[in-house]
């Protein structure tokens, strides 16, 4: 068989394999706020990944120490469940899932999964890392609030009557 026939067959076979993909509706700050019970400024203090009960999926619980509330009510600590993680030699990655690092400072839009467990609303869109500029101002990086000063996000989240 000629090389070009082999390559053509390989392309046909590759085209027949189903591709997995995630589709997310773009959400802005107002959309996320409407779907969230709280928006918190927090620090990541624990990350724990585990198998679900039937060992078909890995989830990660991320513990957030709440430093401030920009909207709604939240406890001093919130544990959000994120799809994916690593347990032993197994890693499950979900495209679009929010990603956390130990000790990082974040702003998260908090909602709930169907079973009542807290989650980050809008997946990656509902999570921003807090970075400080040279003057010490908190600027949000990532998510729907990318590039926005935290003080401006707090202003945007205030009820319309207070603005």
Image (tube, rainbow, N blue to C red):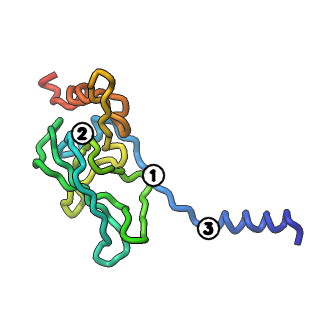
Q: Secondary structure at mark 3?
A: loop
Q: CA distance from mark 3 to mark 1?
A: 19 Å
Q: CA distance from mark 1 to mark 2?
A: 20 Å
Q: CA distance from mark 3 to mark 2?
A: 39 Å
Q: Mark 3 — residue?
A: 17
* Location of residue 32 (image quadrant): top left
Q: Which mark is residue 23?
A: 1
Q: Are marks 3 and 2 in contact (CB under 8 Å)?
A: no
Q: Above or below — where is 43 with respect to 149?
A: below
Q: Secondary structure at mark 2?
A: helix
Badge 2: how crowded within 10 Å, few (<14), some, or many (20+)?
A: many
Badge 3: how crowded within 10 Å, few (<14), some, or many (20+)?
A: few
Instruction: Please provide percent x and percent y for residue 62.
Output: 25, 56
**Between disc 1 and disc 2, whose residue precedes?**
1
**Between disc 3 and disc 2, whose residue precedes?**
3
Instruction: Please provide percent x and percent y for residue 108.
Output: 26, 43
Q: Mark 2 — residue?
A: 33
Q: Above or below — where is 99 with respect to 137?
A: below
Instruction: Please provide percent x and percent y for residue 152.
Output: 25, 25
Say which residue appears at 34% left-offset and 49% top-offset: 123
């Amino acid at each position: 068989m000629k090389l070009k026939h082999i390559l053509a067959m390989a392309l046909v076979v590759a085209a027949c394999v189903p591709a997995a993909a995630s589709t997310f509706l773009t959400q802005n700050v107002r959309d996320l706020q409407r779907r969230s019970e709280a928006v918190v400024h927090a620090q990541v203090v624990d990350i724990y990944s585990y198998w679900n009960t039937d060992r078909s999926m890995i989830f990660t619980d991320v513990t957030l120490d709440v430093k401030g509330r920009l909207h709604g009510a939240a406890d001093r600590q919130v544990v959000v469940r994120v799809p994916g993680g690593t347990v032993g030699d197994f890693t499950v990655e979900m495209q679009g899932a929010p990603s956390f690092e130990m000790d990082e400072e974040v702003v998260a839009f908090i909602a709930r999964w169907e079973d009542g467990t807290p989650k980050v609303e809008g997946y990656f869109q509902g999570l921003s890392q807090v970075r400080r500029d040279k003057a010490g101002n908190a600027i949000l990086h990532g998510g729907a609030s990318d590039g926005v000063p935290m003080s401006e996000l707090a202003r945007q989240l205030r009820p319309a009557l207070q603005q």
